[in-house]
Image (cartoon, grey):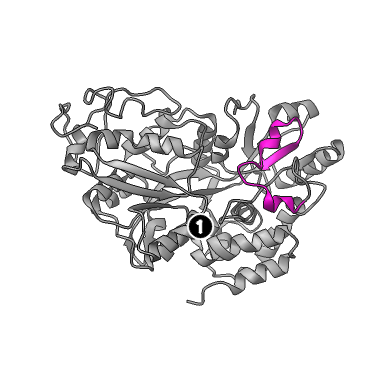
Amino acid sequence: MAHKSQRRSAMVLSGLVAVSLGLAACGSSDDGGGDADAGAGAATEIDCAPYEAFGELDGKKVKVYTSITAPEDEPHINSYKPFEACTGVEIEYEGSKEFEAQLPVRVKGGNAPDIAYLPQPGLLRTMVETGKVVEAPPEVVKNVEANMPDWKTYGEVDGKFYAAALGANVKSFVWYSPAAFEEKGYEIPTTWDELLTLTDKIATDDPDGKPWCAGIESGDATGWPATDWIEDVMLRTAGPETYDKWVNHEIPFNDPAVATAIAEVGKILKNPKYVNGGYGDVKTIASTSFQDAGLPLLDNGGCYMHRQASFYAANFPEGTNVAEDGDVWAFYLPAKDATTKPVLTGGEWVAAFADRPEVKAFQTYLSSVEWADERAKTCGLGGCVTANKNADPALVKNAVDKLSVEMLTDEASTSRVDGSDLMPGAVGSGTFWKGMTDWITGQDDKATLDFIENSWPKS
């Protein structure tokens, strides 16, 4: 670790808010900063001068708890290395597939982490209600206002700001095999009707394969990929204004607009002719892990399409060529017509359960341009887009991440954050997940929507 006594390069600081991390001379090659890259060119030397604003932190530890697990965790861990090398703080990273279920248990039991990456603003509200979440320090607020102002409201609860956005991902993707499409002469659909027509054609052309593969098993979070389907289709069939009313419970969960969306999703996920490529019948969707679900795309027609977010690129085996002319690629999940482009997004929010100096320092680093740029540099297989609008787009090298940035910045795009992430935690990461799992295994549309509606908190 680098210590305060080590040489620092001269640099004019713009304050703790800036946390201006450069790439000039400082620590030695064995100070932990020399291999901060998991997929791009490594920076062997780090300018540690900006970190002096954090004070003396050598030997301190910060415990981070998150739902981000292997293989997506390594780029995150590597992105902390400049901070660790220059401050002397050790970041203890723990990823868990049972994060959403276990975090409330740990907080209630007095075993809260220092920092948690919350994948739902609804869960943030639930955690804030425990009285254990610490308001974000002023330095983080200033970073958020400068770097990601559009995301600030998602980190607020009752007018107080608690959590800065971390990563951002695009969920409105359909993964496919370019080779399989080319062999069969299939064109990328540009409307929802074209997608359904293509689906039916694939089912007719290839009785041994299936048009779609899907999987919603995710430990205690089983069901969340099915909620993404509903949200994406709600944006397409009902429009963003009605979507917002649904998320805020200004219309009931069993409103006709939601019934239309679930019926439309059912045309694909509940049709045994269309799913579940490489795994079995419709019910196998509930027992197929989301990590494995899209792998039959590589199996020469095991399945032809898989709807999943940009971060899914990290789940393909090492050596998979993820590119427009590669082994797998992705296209935009089409809307009702080709002139509109609703985009479903997601992310994580950094909440602190401690206000020690080293925790505040790490929060500030994660809200800075410098961390966003470091995250891009450590990125391997994709899923490395951040919410930080001031990050250097030239550092985004991964093809899928570039595609995500293009989609998010398209003037025709209308983006909305994942609806279940915004709903109260009891619904968004509770009954919505369970209801969709039961729906996949046989429960009808009405019973599913009624169950979720009846679970909505009364106050």
Q: Residue at x 50, y 59 (%)?
A: 101
Using the image, determine if residue 268 lies above or below residue 427: above
Magenta span covers which residues?
Answer: 282-306
Please name whichever residue, 233 or 119, is drawn nearer the observer in this view of the structure.
119
Residue 391 visible at all: no
Please name whichever residue, 6 or 21, is drawn nearer the observer in this view of the structure.
6
| Amino acid carrying mark 1 in the image | Asp
Q: Residue at x 44, y 62 (%)?
A: 104
* Residue at the spot of label 1: 421
Helix or strand or loop: what does disc 1 sit on?
helix
Q: Residue at x 23, y 38 (%)?
A: 87
In percent of width and height, residue 55 lies at 16, 43
In percent of width and height, residue 320 lies at 61, 27
Q: Say left or right for 124 vs 10.
A: right
In percent of width and height, residue 348 lies at 44, 49
Residue 181 visible at all: yes
